[in-house]
Amino acid sequence: MRLLAFGCLLALLFPLPVLQSTEIVLEGTIARANHGTYLVREFFVPEPLERLEVEYTYTHRGEGTAIDIGIFDPVRFRGWSGSDKTRFFIARDEATPSYLPGDLPAGTWRIL
């Protein structure tokens, strides 16, 4: 059975008098049994954000392995992209193409 390891780095910028950056690292393993399924990883944002940056990597990239990525805020779907994009950002006034800009509320966000 071939396993695929992946990692996702979330850089959260909170709206404080002096901007702070907080990183959340999500890691996991995807097995052949997960092929064609959606895996959901949740993370909690304790206060509204100014900007959210996501970067992900995985082993066996370029060997026919592809992982697409999408994101939901606590209220709605915010975007989706194919494996050709390994990073994206969402901010109040702008976002990476295929992602929706807008307020970045506190609460439980989901990456899939």
Image (cartoon, rainbow, N blue to C red):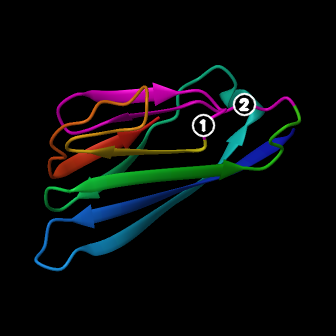
Query: How many numbered marks have been drawn onto this rendered protein structure?
Result: 2
Give, as a three-letter code, the residue at label 1.
Answer: Lys
For label 2, the SS is: loop
Residue 99 sits in which quadrant? top left
Q: Is residue 47 left or right of residue 23?
A: left
Residue under label 1: 85
Which quadrant would the N terminus be assigned to in this image?
top right
**Magenta-tinted stretch:** 64-85
Bin the neighbour count of mark 2 within 10 Å (Cα to Cα): few under 14, some 14-19, many 20 and up: few
Tell which residue pokes out farthest to the top in this image.
36
| Disc 1 secondary structure class | loop
Residue in the image at 59% along x and 50% along y:
56
Front residue of 112/90: it is 90
- Labels 2, 1: front one: 1
Disc number at residue 60?
none
Whether residue 93 appears in magenta in the rendering, the answer is no
The foreground one among 83 and 35 is 83
Task: List x then y, in percent, for residue 9.
Answer: 50, 59
Residue 85 in percent (x, y) is at 60, 37
User: Where in the figure is residue 58, as x and y percent of width and height?
Assistant: 71, 49
Q: State which quadrant residue 61 falls in.
A: top right
Identify the residue shown where x is 26% and y is 35%: 101
Distance from disc 2 to disc 1, alpha carbons, whole Å, reads 11 Å
Residue sitting at 70 percent across and 25 percent down? 35
Amino acid type, callout 2: Ala
User: Which residue is the site of mark 2?
Assistant: 66
Q: Nearer the viewer, residue 31 or 9?
A: 9
Q: In the image, what residue occupies the spot 15% across and 52% down?
A: 106
Mark 1 neighbour class, 10 Å CA radius: few under 14, some 14 to 19, many 20 or more:
some
Are the residues tagged 2 and 1 within 8 Å (C-beta)?
Answer: no
Q: Position of residue 60 (x, y in %)?
A: 84, 44
